[in-house]
Image (cartoon, rainbow, N blue to C red):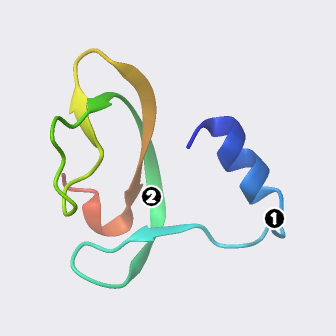
Amino acid sequence: MTVNELIAELQKHPPETRVVVSGYEDGVDDISRLWPIHVAPTPNPKPYFGRWEIEQTGEPAIFLFGRGRDDE
């Protein structure tokens, strides 16, 4: 999803609507920060792995951190 796609989706909801991400083990958490990264497609991805890997170079992306992931 791109920033434009995310904005378009978010604009369909009231501005006070909470945005959450997966919790560390279970449940959901508030977004605590955004982190600019670069990603590249995962070679031969398995269904249980993400489609993208964090790389030094590659496509720019924004990683959303949940409260439970602040220490990573």
Mark 1 crowdedness (10 Å alpha carbons): few <14, some 14-19, many ≥20: few
Determine which residue is flagged by label 1.
15
Q: Position of residue 24 (x, y in %)?
A: 24, 72
Is residue 10 shown above or below 22? above
Describe residue 68's horizontal placement relative to residue 44 as left or right.
right
The structure residue drawn at horizontal position 83% and vertical position 63%, both measured from the top left corner, is: 12
Mark 1 or mark 2, which is nearer the start of the sequence?
Answer: 1
Q: Position of residue 39 (x, y in %)?
A: 32, 29
Determine which residue is flagged by label 2.
32
- In the image, what residue type sits under mark 2? Ser
Q: Position of residue 22 (x, y in %)?
A: 37, 71
Is residue 39 shown above or below 9? above
Is residue 10 shown above or below 39? below
- In the image, what residue type sits under mark 1? Pro
User: Looking at the rendering, which quadrant does residue 13 occupy?
Assistant: bottom right
Name of the residue lying farthest toward the bottom: 27
